Every structure is written in structure tokens, then in C-alpha cells.
Image (tube, rainbow, N blue to C red):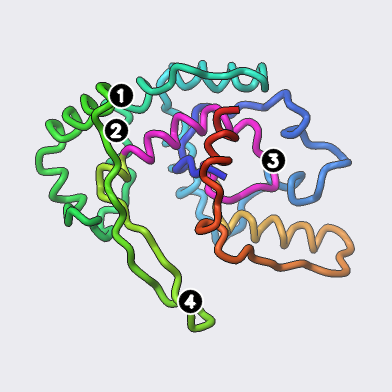
Amino acid sequence: MMNGYRESDSPIISEKPSNKTGDNKPVAEKVEKRGLAERNPSKQNRSQAQSWIFLPNELDRIRYAAQRNREEQFTSLWHHVYDIRRLRRSYFKLKRNSAAGIDGKTWKEYGKNLGDNLKNLSERLRKGAYRARAVKRTYIPKGDGRQRPIGIPVLEDKIVQRAMVEVLNAIYEVDFLGFSYGFRPGRSQHNALDAVVEAIEGRKVNWVLDLDIRGFFDAIDHEWLVKFVEH
């Protein structure tokens, strides 16, 4: 699922069957609109909703078009990515204390000349001169004693990635099912756990399946993924 980094426009009720609720829907999907649990502060969620509301009108139109016609193909989106306003918003949504990439440039350092840096980045994106940098490879320990490889992009790549996610979310968010919580605007693992609790308490449950896909992100077929997004 793509990460929309917690942004969208005003709430939209999709007309697609996949996003409707009904008696034949799984419980986890039907309970997605319930009140949040106490451990999920409403203030935080209001903040997420507000950051989701103020998308530019251009993305509103893209989202509506995606809702109306699932077969719609969008062929002119790049200018939304290099829009300086979107790049600026992406910058401020980055974690300020995140580890730097191979260039060693931190969030704070990049922000000292933010206007010129974003203008330069936008121009490179517009002209097709932008090239993603290599990621910095590091490892974090896992609970079973093994190590998980992590790639740390340079700061500008993080900015561009967030901008792209924001644009792509306007298209694909309307297709995601209600019981899907991974890397989606305004959702988190806490919401998923709340839905599980609601489902277990709301009906008879005989068993629960807990599983993980081994090395999922490391094994993704990127060529297939690009074709899927193009479709």
C-alpha cells in the first residue's frame, strides 16, 4: 500500500463497491468508521485530518476522476510532483532527526537555504535532470537475533518520494479496501489493532491467523510493480 503520508482532501464517500459498507463486508472493514479508542488521541487524528484536507484543487480533480472511472489513466502528473508548494510541504513532513543519507545532509542543514534548495530541486525535476542517489545501507537488530537491512535515502530523495506518494494517493486511495491499514493516510497499526479488537468482541471468533511475509520489500519485483502502477 502506498504511503500517503497522512494527507488527503475533504472526506469522500466512494461509489465503488469495494469501498461501500454492508452486511456482507468483513467486520474489520465495517468498523473502520467507528470512534477511535482512547489510546488514539482525537487531537492527533484531527491534526491528521486537517493536513489531509488542504490539498490543492488539482489533486481534488484527479481524485474525483479516479473515483468516477476505475479505468481512467493519468498521463500528465509530473508537474504536480515538482510543484514547489508540494515539495515544501513534503520537506516539513519529514522527521527532523532522521539519519542522513550518503551525502550527510540533515533536515536542519537543508532548511538553512530552503527556498533556493527547493527551487533548484524543482527545476531539476522539471527538466528531467534529477537523479536519485544511492541509499545508505545500515542494519537494525530483529527480535530473533537476525538483522534487518535498511536503506536510508538522501534528504532530497525523501522529499521527492513524499511528493510522489501524495500525488499517487489521490489516484489509488479510493481503490483500497476499508480493512487495509498499511501506509495509508490517517491510518496506523493502532487503528488496525482497534479493528481486530472490535471484530473479536463483536462476533464469535474461533481462531486468529498471525503471519508475516519473509523479506517482502527485499523480494518485490520492481518491474512488475511499475507495470501495475501504470495500469
Give the alpha-carbon distance from disc 4 to disc 2, as whole Å.
Answer: 34 Å
In this image, 186 relative to 102: left or right?
A: right
The residue under label 3 is 177
Amino acid under label 4? Lys
Other-residue count near label 2 (Cα within 10 Å), few / some / many at <14 / 14–19 / ≥20: many
Res. 87 mark: 2
Q: Is residue 10 or residue 167 the one in the foreground?
A: 167
Give the alpha-carbon distance from disc 2 to disc 3, as whole Å.
Answer: 28 Å
Label whose residue precedes the other's in the sequence (4 or 3): 4
Q: Is residue 28 or residue 68 the one in the foreground?
A: 68
Label whose residue precedes the other's in the sequence (2 or 3): 2
Other-residue count near label 4 (Cα within 10 Å), few / some / many at <14 / 14–19 / ≥20: few
Amino acid under label 1? Asp
The residue under label 4 is 142
Q: Looking at the figure, which quarter contains the C terminus?
A: top right
Tell me the SS state at disc 3: loop
The magenta segment is 160-186
Res. 36 mark: none
The residue under label 1 is 83
Q: Looking at the figure, which quarter contains the N terminus?
A: top right
